[in-house]
Amino acid sequence: NATWLSFSAGSYAQSHAHQDQGSFTLFSGDWLAVTENIWSRSGIQQGTEVHNVVRFVRGGANVRQREGTRSTMSTPQLGPSPGEVHVTGNLSAAYTAGAGVTSWQRSLDFSGSSLRVTDQFSVLPGTQAIFQVNTPAKPIISGQTATAGSLKIRVIEPLNATLRVIEWRTVNSDFNSGWKLEVEGASTN
């Protein structure tokens, strides 16, 4: 009956590694949020678009995380309750200077059955930030909330965010199933 949470922030040093610095995975009885790779035929989709990250887009192309970098992670407190976790990752190093992303920091606060994901970032003009989470069930959007099976996602910021659902099978024939919720808005968080 346990809930499992993972967060990636560290060394990106191998050419075969994925661009998943800042990604998280959440499991509770079944996958709630996980890389889209588990529903692919190949399992080798490396780009940011298949991971639960903020994806940055500049000039119509995804800004790539760069190999040979090290993001950092800290756990400022583990919380007073068993299973409570607070972690912050500085993911700025994963991006080349001038490529569009000046800084990105992600905090995860997990307590009970609630996970709060907070992103703070700075981008160059012309760079768009898209929060994304991949789910096994189709997210149903109602206002600023999306429900994907047992996962309820409530967008707090940015105000008046735009939520969009993507079915992976319509994007690439490598995917057998899976969905992605994208959240966009004019904000730095």
Image: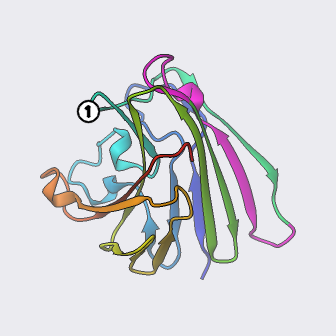
Q: Choose top left, top right, bottom left or bottom right for residue 19.
A: top left
**Left or right side of 117 for 174:** left
Residue 81 within the segment the image draws in magenta: yes
Magenta span covers which residues?
Answer: 80-102
Q: Quadrant of the N terminus?
A: bottom right
Of residues 98 and 81, the one nearer the viewer is 98
Density class for disc 1 (Cα within 10 Å; few <14, some 14-19, many ≥20) is few
Residue 42 x, y percent position in the rendering = 23, 48
> What residue is shown with label 1?
60
Q: Amino acid at mark 1?
A: Gly
SS of the residue under disc 1: loop
Q: Position of residue 84 (x, y in %)?
A: 75, 67
The quarter of the displayed image where residue 108 is located = bottom right
Establish if 52 lies above or below 151. above
- The picture quadrant where one finds residue 160 is bottom left
Rendered location of residue 20, percent (x, y) = 46, 41
Residue 173 or 124: which is nearer the viewer?
A: 124
